[in-house]
Image (cartoon, helix red, strand yellow):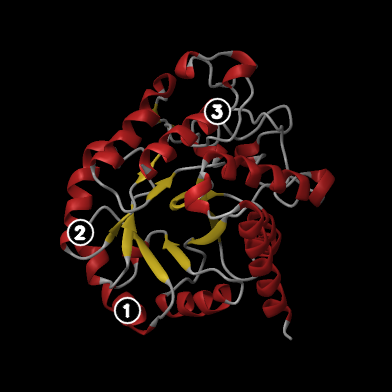
Amino acid sequence: MPALKLLRLAILLGAAFFACATGARADDGGPSYRVGIFYYPWFATPRSDGHYAHWQQGGLAPPAAVASSFYPARGTYSSADAVVVEAQMRDIAGTGVGTVIASWWGRGSFEDRRLPQLLGAAARHGLSVAAHLEPYRGRTVASTEGDIAYLRELGVSDFYVWASTILPDAEWADLNERLEGVRLFANTNLAGRAAAGGFAGLYTYDVLLFDGPLFPRLCRQARTLGLLCAPSVGPGYDARRATADARVKPRRAGATYDGMWRAALRARADLITITSYNEWHEGTQIEAARPGRGGYLGYDGAWGLSGVGAETSYLDRTAYWVRRFNH
């Protein structure tokens, strides 16, 4: 049996074992597959990988200085570290989120090589994995068709296409008409473009530009066109330490996150996507951050918490909102 099929079988058996051991997901308060979270498997450290990747972006010198306005409670970690990935999947499952939407930059990429480990860890925690198809060099609709066939062999059936509108709607429509057993979501705030491309639904991702007031209109338009509406909620945005982008969307002690969730619920979203679990560069992460010091921001003040007690506050609040969404 080919290696990919063996891997897929192992993942499916792992998920089945988890489900049998814990009972039906809808009944036991476990992960909801109507909620997905964007996840980045692209971090590396000298200890695990022989070099830093992403932590050093912008010429910074980790571990003392990292490419984020926040500092991870886990410190600088490698996305290849099995212990870290297992703990991250435990974090996500604990919030009630059911789908990990993994950043993927093409076959043979750094992120692609980490995908099998991620799939295995996710399955052990009852999580599904979707692919966030990024705009790798040379990406076309035709190459995306091959990518989907490749990833389906690993058991992936949901695909979120970042910057989908830079490629022709007619080509997307032709591809989506041929595909079976998968769902493609267009990254756009224009429901008409997603419909023209024949997508199953749409998502916004960008929590800086596409805020809660947009969601009711967007989801109403999506429903009219027969699309699934999966708006993206997030805690804020701050990429100043990692990039030249000076724009900031403050977290407001958790009020920004709450406001976006409320808007998604008011919009009667079909699914909700979260930006993000660990996009540390842009400051959209909800992964645990250490208390603010050394020039880094922390989660102090979020929902009245401070210090160590605030480290996991966004994970805990996500669990609250997922429960609200499911009921």
Q: CA distance from mark 1 to mark 2?
A: 23 Å
Figure check: 151 above or below 227: below
Q: Nearer the viewer, residue 234 or 315?
A: 315
Q: What is the x, y in percent for residue 9?
A: 68, 74
Q: What is the x, y in percent for residue 39?
A: 55, 49
Q: What is the x, y in percent for residue 40?
A: 58, 49
Of the two numbered discs 3 and 1 on the same chain, state the one appearing first in sequence: 3
- Can you identify the residue that label 2 sits on? 223
- At mark 2, the secondary structure is helix
- Can you identify the residue that label 3 sits on? 69
Q: What type is the residue that disc 2 sits on?
A: Arg
- Can you identify the residue that label 1 sits on? 171
Q: Is residue 1 left or right of residue 157?
A: right
Q: What is the x, y in percent for residue 116?
A: 68, 64
Figure check: 226 above or below 84: below
**Which quarter shows the N terminus?**
bottom right
**Which quarter shows the C terminus?**
top left
Q: Nearer the viewer, residue 302 or 46?
A: 302
Q: What type is the residue that disc 3 sits on?
A: Ser
Q: What type is the residue that disc 1 sits on?
A: Glu
Q: CA distance from mark 3 to mark 2?
A: 38 Å
- At mark 3, the secondary structure is loop
Q: Nearer the viewer, residue 280 or 159?
A: 159
Number of residues whose C-alpha sits closer than 10 Å to that of mark 3, classed few (under 14), some (14–19) or many (20 or more): many
